[in-house]
């Protein structure tokens, strides 16, 4: 189903707590960054030859089940993606682009507080309650994973790319999801030239940092991704390289992000 009920949420929380606890039991109290083994574990392989012989590669995990989020605690994982279908949620999200084409919401709080605020601010339309419930669910999941009392939430209708160049976030971890439009674009580690990130030859060079034979990946609408940033304790400065996709007045996006507070 596109929205989990209360029983399913409790089941998810139980699975995640158990999985995270098992992961943490395997980790020493003090992490020795010199002995961390980072492997490229994603099943997708590059076309023809490897573009980078550097062995310090991080992997990406995908699943149609939400407990994939707990894999973000694995040292060799840089991004965990919950692949899901939005179902009737899409109807409300699409209507929001029409009824509130400039909608911008940025706040912080617990799931109950954010639920109340969104319920007041979002325009009325069919499946609004389901949409608010879904956002609240993601807030609960994110807070559970990282033991947060409050979460920073941003929900925006976008008609242009917020961050058009490839970059890495200077944070521990962020949750991103697109309800309408193109999803965030990202690169496998082997396709990145990190010392070229943000160093394009001119202002329109938005591919700076992408290997000349590299491939750009894109999250789909409905996908929910946890992306490690450079400040994750074991990232070693190799957070997920990503950028905002193009958007316009004719092709808008409804984008959600959650941050640690």
Image (cartoon, rainbow, N blue to C red):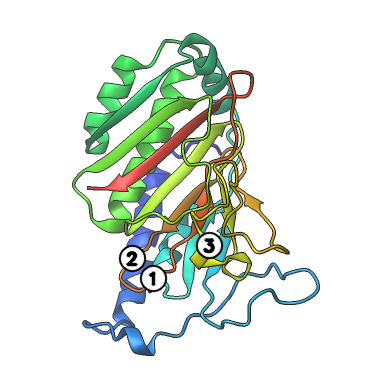
Q: Looking at the rendering, which quadrant does residue 204 occupy? A: top right
Farthest residue, direction bottom: 35
Q: Are marks 2 and 1 in contact (CB under 8 Å)?
A: yes
Q: Secondary structure at mark 2?
A: loop
Q: CA distance from mark 1 to mark 3?
A: 19 Å
Which residue bears the numbered disc 2? 232
Q: Secondary structure at mark 3?
A: helix
Q: CA distance from mark 3 to mark 2?
A: 21 Å
**Which residue sits at x=58%, y=52%?**
201
Q: Does residue 155 show up?
A: yes
Instruction: State left or right for residue 199 relative to residue 148.
Output: right
On the image, the x and y values in percent for residue 147 come to 23, 56
**Which residue sits at x=21%, y=82%?**
29
Q: Earlier in the sequence, mark 3 or mark 2?
A: 3
**Which residue sits at x=41%, y=63%?**
70
Q: Earlier in the sequence, mark 1 or mark 3?
A: 3
Q: Does residue 6 show up?
A: no
On the image, the x and y values in percent for residue 17 come to 32, 63
Q: Secondary structure at mark 1?
A: loop
Which residue bears the numbered disc 1? 235
Instruction: State left or right for residue 183 relative to residue 144.
Output: right
Which residue bears the numbered disc 3? 196
Q: Residues within 10 Å of mark 2 (few under 14, many from 20)?
A: some
**Which residue sits at x=43%, y=56%?**
168
Viewer-side residue, 199 vs 124: 199
Residue 45, above or below 114 = below
Q: Looking at the rendering, which quadrant does residue 104 occupy? A: top left
């Amino acid at each position: 189903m596109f929205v989990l009920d209360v029983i399913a949420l409790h089941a998810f929380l139980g699975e995640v707590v158990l999985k995270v606890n098992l992961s943490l039991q395997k980790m020493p109290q003090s992490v020795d960054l010199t002995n961390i083994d980072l492997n490229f574990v994603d099943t997708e392989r590059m076309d023809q030859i490897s573009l980078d012989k550097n062995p310090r590669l991080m992997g990406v995990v995908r699943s149609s089940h939400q407990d994939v989020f707990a894999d973000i605690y694995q040292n060799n994982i840089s991004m965990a993606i919950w692949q899901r279908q939005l179902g009737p949620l899409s109807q409300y999200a699409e209507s929001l682009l029409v009824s509130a084409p400039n909608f911008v919401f940025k706040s912080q709080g617990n799931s109950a507080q954010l639920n109340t605020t969104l319920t007041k601010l979002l325009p009325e339309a069919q499946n609004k309650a389901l949409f608010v419930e879904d956002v609240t669910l993601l807030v609960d999941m994110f807070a559970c994973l990282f033991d947060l009392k409050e979460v920073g939430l941003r929900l925006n209708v976008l008609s242009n790319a917020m961050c058009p160049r490839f970059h890495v976030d200077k944070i521990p971890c962020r949750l991103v999801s697109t309800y309408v439009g193109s999803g965030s674009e990202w690169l496998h580690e082997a396709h990145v030239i990190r010392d070229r990130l943000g160093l394009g030859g001119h202002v329109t060079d938005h591919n700076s940092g992408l290997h000349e034979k590299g491939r750009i990946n894109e999250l789909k609408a409905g996908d929910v991704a946890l992306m490690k940033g450079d400040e994750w304790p074991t990232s070693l400065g190799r957070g997920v390289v990503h950028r905002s996709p193009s958007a316009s007045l004719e092709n808008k996006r409804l984008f959600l992000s959650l941050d640690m507070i």
